[in-house]
Amino acid sequence: MDLDPGRGNPDAVRDVSRQFATRADGMTERARAGRGALESLAGLESAALDALRARVASAVDKFDRAADAATEASDILGGYAASLDDIRSRARALLDEAQASYDRIWWRRGQALNEASETVTGWALGWDDVLPSWMYLDDPGYLHRWQDAIDDYRLLRPQLLSLQTERDQLDSRTATRLRGIGLLGELKPSHGVSGRAAAAALWAGDATGISAEGLAGLEDPDLIREVWNGLTPEQRAALIAAAPLVIGNLNGIPLRDRVAANRINIRDEIAARETKIEKIEQQKAEALRNAYYGDDDVAAVYDQQIDEQQAVIDYYQSLLDQQVTWRDESGVPHTDDGARVVVFDPRNQAIATYQGPLDPATGDIPEWVRNVAVSVPGTGASMTDFNDELGSHLYTAAGKESAVFQWAGGEFPQNLWEATSSSYADKLAPELRDFTNAIAVPEGADLTVLGHSYGGATVGLAEQAGLSADRILYVAAAGMGHGVDGLLDFPLTKDVPHYSMMARNDLVVGLIQGADGGGLHGQSALDADGVIRLETGFVQDGDPGSGTIEGHNIPGNGTIPAIDAHSTILQRGTGAFENIVAVITGGSAELYAPDETLYVQGYPVHASGLESSDYTPQYTEVE
Amino acid sequence: MADLVVSEANIVGAAVLLRQAAEPVSDAMCIASSATGSDAVAAALDDVEFVLRHVMDGLAEVAADSACDADGIAATFDELDGTLSGDLP
């Protein structure tokens, strides 16, 4: 019997119990000292002393509660030790009885079989086997007594199992009681060792020793922001310097500080790539030394790698050199050096930029901003060549009371074949949800989340995962997300206004629009229940003479209008672009003009609603 | 105008008591899982010990900071008092 219900050392457990009791006493003493300090300060009046008294009173209360927690742990362990004693004692008795019973089996076996018989037949008999009676020539009573000894032994096993079950239940109850100690439940949710340490320190009222990893482990962006804002500028600067990759990408950290951290990250990444170029140069030199022929061919391979690295370095440098213009509450333009990069994580191919004002006091979006937008690009978005021009154009067009994020917080598909997979969107969606839900949107401002192409499917999956927003816009979206049937799949956004738009002849995503969640990227946003389709309109908004988006051919790129329409939809000044701005700002957006089917000489001809003779733009007020 | 009733001696006394509260309670405990004979109980104990340890350290830090603040307030009032009484230039 290989069970041991009595394992463990009750005396050691009692020792731990006493240590917790000693701790409780220690903390009670400290609470007493704190009360003494409060008594010393009683009757004294000043603002500084009032603040000090409040802190000391809080600490006294916490010392008392920590003492209670230690006492509770001590009591639980004391009871556990007593129960362990009892189970050990019973287990010992059972195991002793089992050993004696087992010994009796061999004694009875020895009585039944003499040495010669044991040698001849014993090898074939297990410990719980008895020689068959037809083989036994002696008194069958020996066989009966031998079998009885085996049966007696077997009866003990269920008893031992039952005792083991009792022990397992005791352990489970004790572990549950320990984890149920009130203090543990009062800590803010966190993950990881650092997060747990930070949560405990914050409970105690001490934020000074929190590390960047500890902050990141706190999970709740509002708490992270609260803790961050409670630090001194020196403490914040120290954390940024010590862990820029953490701080620059941590939801809850004010935008200004994320930007500062990401400047460091961008410089670090440039330096890393410059080091890489040096290594490639060395490899190239080595290869050329060893080459027998074709120096140019040998060099070309390395030169291409160097060019690739340099291109990324140049792009990252452009982020640092970029001039960003924003307008203050009075509309006065200001220009700052450096892009506002609020996400920059080469480990996850993540990048996001911010266009708009920053409150000098909070470092976040100012309270007077009314319209916040998060724009998600589509296939081809990449952190090594991130195009945040759309974010800039949307901000400029939406006006000074706006703020726009251009977000590519993870790996995007880089070609149409990769874009047929929802795996990228599956990974991006929770990141988008967490980033968006952590934005400190000013009271009374509206948050719009819009996704273009693959970005639209990402937005839909983020909604399904719990993204919160005031408006959603799908722009030439691949769908509402694989598995999404409609708005009812969105726990927090099913009741907010949803809009969509797509050029009528969009060949990039037009042919993959799904009828339900089973589509490649889920239900099409164009005809989902509750989604309002908007018009893409003309190349110059309001000017039919400029031609429709559908008919526009971008000069020089070699693609047909049906392909170009997929991106012309984002071009400044187009009807589509103006509608996007209208959704962001809560203005008037032109509704989709339904197409018509005409019959010419008996044959059906599909005619764009824009080209209908009685076309008149119809508008909706964006809610 | 805000009231101002101070006693430097009392504030200094409070600082002394707060420094007592800031003294470390005890060393960290190392709880071997063989003591309990149960991984579940040992893990739960580790969690309790971890949290209590960091709470005690945090409270000690708060008490120490409060003691420093009390000292600072006392020193400030002392200097102010001296200035107002004309003892200091």
Image (cartoon, coloured by chain):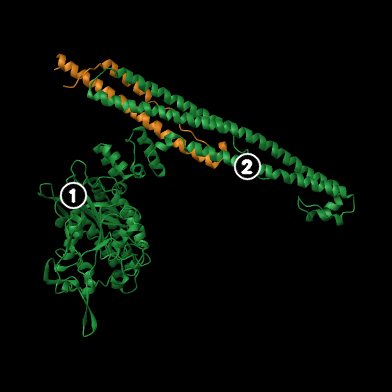
Picture quadrant where residue B34 is located: top right
Chain letter matching colour green: A
Secondary structure state at the residue bearing disc 2? helix
Name the chain under label 1: A
Residue type, label 2: Gln
Residue type, label 1: Arg
State the residue in front, A350 or A563.
Answer: A563
Chain letter matching colour orange: B
Quarter of the rendering occupied by the N terminus of chain A: top right
Q: Position of residue A300 (x, y in %)?
A: 29, 70
Name the N-terminal-most of marks 2 and 1: 2
**Residue picked out by circle 2:** A164
Whether A618 is drawn above or below A265: the answer is below
Whether A131 is drawn above or below B54: the answer is below
**In the drawing, does residue A231 fall left or right of residue A150?**
left
- CA gap between label 2 and label 1 equals 65 Å
Whether A331 is drawn above or below A611: the answer is above
